[in-house]
Image: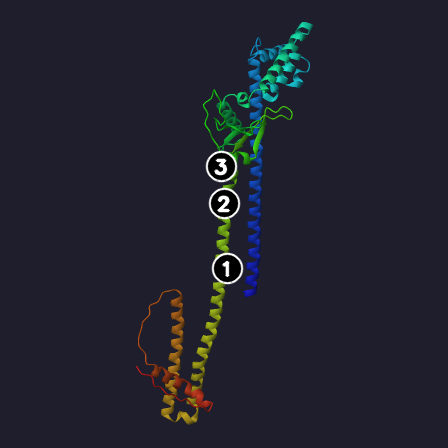
Amino acid sequence: MKRSSIWIIIGLMTVALAGIISLQADWIIRSIHLNEEQFDKNVFAALFRVAERLESQESIAALESMNGFESNYLEQEYRQVLKAGPKDLMDLNLDHMMADNLPNDQLAGFLLNQNSCDCESCRLERQIKYFQIMRKRIQRSQLDLTDRLGDLEGIHHMLHEELENAGLNADFHYGIYSNETNSFIINDDHYVVLDQNTQVSQGGGFDKLLNSGYKVSLFPEGKNVPGLLMIYFPTKVTAIWGSVIRNLIGSVLFTGIILFCFAYTIMIVFRQKKVSEMKNDFINNMTHEFKTPIATISLAADSISSPMVSGDSTKVKRFADIIRQENRRMNNQVEKVLQMALIEKQDFQLNWSAINLHEVIHTAMENFSIQVERRNGTLDSELNAER
């Protein structure tokens, strides 16, 4: 394979891997954004439900505090309306409204207007009771925000319950901020505003609550919002990444394996390319090494066949020795090839021995002397090496 073809394949594989990695990264980022949006949506839904429950709790407290007004009045009226069976009862779905979907003051007004008795005195009594309920609501709205909230443990329980219903099990810290005093009055089941009837725990450092962005209005009455319920999640990142981290780890792991295999394959390709080039060089060198003794043997054989040499036993012996030496040289080349194969398999043992370089040089000169003489050349040597 040509080197240019290898580089083209490497380029295509690199582009493909980069595309896969970018698509996976985009998918993971989108998943994180979707999880974050869903997390925010669930948190705000839970906070709104808590705010509604606090308003319902205040309405019930207003009813229970009324003189001459039974605490289970709404329930009694509800049962009377069911018994009477008004025409539009099914359309209004009172069962659903009783599940805190309709504020208690509105529910009270509806039930008072749906009483089965339609005489003038009953209507007047219902109107009086309705005005009493609304007056109590107005009176409670004049109270401090701390008095309107009720039990702190109940607030924490509501938050925990609503967050759990929304599928959020992350740890949280909450606080209630008063717009009247421009300060926090409650922080994690502790009052941070002095109160005569309550032992308080002073606290501070509400930057995380203020900057969390999770807040909902408490007891809103038109433009008047007495307080805010805020919440902060210290493990928000863990909660958002929880469903993505496994896919992220798997994606990184498998992508790493692909990159490793790709890099290893490229390394093997270049190594094989280099081996192929070395093999070609070796074949060329060995061809040259075998051509030289073959040519020398051919010249020696031709010389022996010559009538001028065949009658001279000394020359015949000399050429025979040359043929023998060249044959030995070819055998040595074959041995070298076999030794190289053993070296490549790492199955060899080196035998170190001393040699006489002068003898090696003399032998080489004798082997080349025939070719040199045939071309009217001479070989001279000056060997002054010392042991």
The residue wearing badge 3 is: 235
Residue 336 in the image, given as x and y percentages of width and height:
39, 73
Q: Upstream in the sequence, badge 2 or badge 1?
A: 2
Give the Cα distance between marks 3 and 2.
Answer: 23 Å
Circle 1 sits in a helix, a strand or a loop, which is it? helix
The residue wearing badge 2 is: 250
Give the Cα distance between marks 2 and 1.
Answer: 24 Å
Q: Nearer the viewer, mark 2 or mark 1?
A: 2
- 381 horizontally vs 150: left or right: left
Does residue 378 sit above or below 234 in this rendering? below
Circle 2 sits in a helix, a strand or a loop, which is it? helix
Circle 3 sits in a helix, a strand or a loop, which is it? loop
Q: Upstream in the sequence, badge 1 or badge 3?
A: 3
Disc marking residue 232? none
The residue wearing badge 1 is: 266
Question: Dividing the image into 4 quarters, which one contains the C terminus?
Answer: bottom left
Residue 247 seen anywhere in this rendered image of the structure: yes
Q: Residues within 10 Å of mark 3 (few under 14, many from 20)?
A: few
Q: Nearer the viewer, mark 3 or mark 2?
A: 3
Q: Nearer the viewer, mark 1 or mark 3?
A: 3
Pointers 1 and 3 in contact (C-beta within 8 Å)? no
Residue 245 in the image, given as x and y percentages of width and height:
50, 42
Pointers 2 and 1 in contact (C-beta within 8 Å)? no
Does residue 57 sit above or below 166 in this rendering? above
Q: Amino acid at mark 3?
A: Thr
Determine the residue positioned at 58% across, 46% down: 26
- Given residues 26 and 105, the one toward you in this image is 105
